[in-house]
Image (spheres, rainbow, N blue to C red):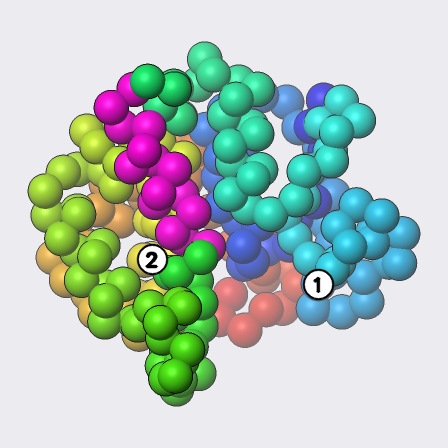
Amino acid sequence: MITFYHAPWSRASGIFWLLEELGEPYEMKMVDIRGTVPEEYRAIQPNKKVPAIVHDGTTVTERAAISIYLCEQFPQAGLMPAPGDPDRAAFLTWLTYADGVMDPVLAAKANGHEYMGKSYSYGSFTEMINNVEKTLSSRPYIAGDRFTAADIQIGGGLQYGMFALKVVPQKPVFLDYVQRLSERPAYKASFGRDMEMAREQGLPGA
């Protein structure tokens, strides 16, 4: 059994979508990351952030790690290329790119920063946009010709950057990609419920 620790409109939303794609039973527990987080949650996630999962006694935190772990545990879903698959390297690259590059530069751009002297470490917003655009112009999904868990993170980042943060340019290739992903039943289920929870919590823009 999977226990999933979640907060609406957070980095956990991608794991919510992934769990719906897997179709495996799970229990969701809410974490009030915008309010008071119970101290006992620190035993699960030391920084008291989301997402986190506990699967049959095994705790996994960090979005990319959770994605890989779940895809390995449930390979029948076909959401991660297997070792030796030609798309494996691209999958791992883009899955970790979402957390290591895309999220930091989106946050920086939204707050009026460009990392300036530290751009050698994180890369720039413009470079990120160009890299993603170039890749999606050559194939339908971020790691190749099929949908993978990496699309959840990259697609979710683009959608958030275009429509919530309003810093990502609405390029045709981005809009087509996000539209393609948003037609998936698992996306509709997770996004719809996330929106409901956001409204229940009175989050801005819900």
Per the model, the C-alpha gap separating discs 1 and 2 is: 22 Å
Q: Quadrant of the N terminus?
A: top right
Q: Quadrant of residue 78?
A: top left
Residue 53: percent from left, percent from top: 68, 37
As rendered, which of 58 and 24 lies closer to the eye? 58
Q: Magenta stretch: residue 97 in it?
A: yes
From this view, report whether residue 133 is shown above or below residue 142.
Answer: below
Tell me the quarter of the picture where residue 8 sits: bottom right
In the displayed structure, 103 sits above or below 15; it is below
Circle 1/circle 2 CB separation < 8 Å: no
Above/below status of 37 relative to 88: below
Residue 72: image x %, image y %? 52, 22
Residue 135's x, y, as percent? Answer: 17, 47
Report whether residue 108 is seen: yes
Classify residue 18 as left or right of residue 162. right
Span colored in magenta:
85-99
The one nearer the camera, 41 or 159, is: 41
Q: Secondary structure at mark 1?
A: loop
Give amino acid for label 1. Ile
At x 26%, y 49%, the residue is: 178
Residue at the image point whose x is 38% and y is 19% from the top = 82
- Residue that badge 2 annotates: 159
145 vs 83, left or right, is left
Q: Which residue is rendered at x = 44% and y = 72% of the image?
A: 107
Residue that numbered label 1 is attached to: 33
Q: Amino acid at mark 2?
A: Gln
Task: State the mark number for residue 187.
Answer: none
The location of residue 89, given as percent across then percent down, is: 32, 33
User: Any magenta on residue 151?
Assistant: no
Mark toward the start of the polypeptide (1 vs 2): 1
Q: Residue furthest top?
A: 76
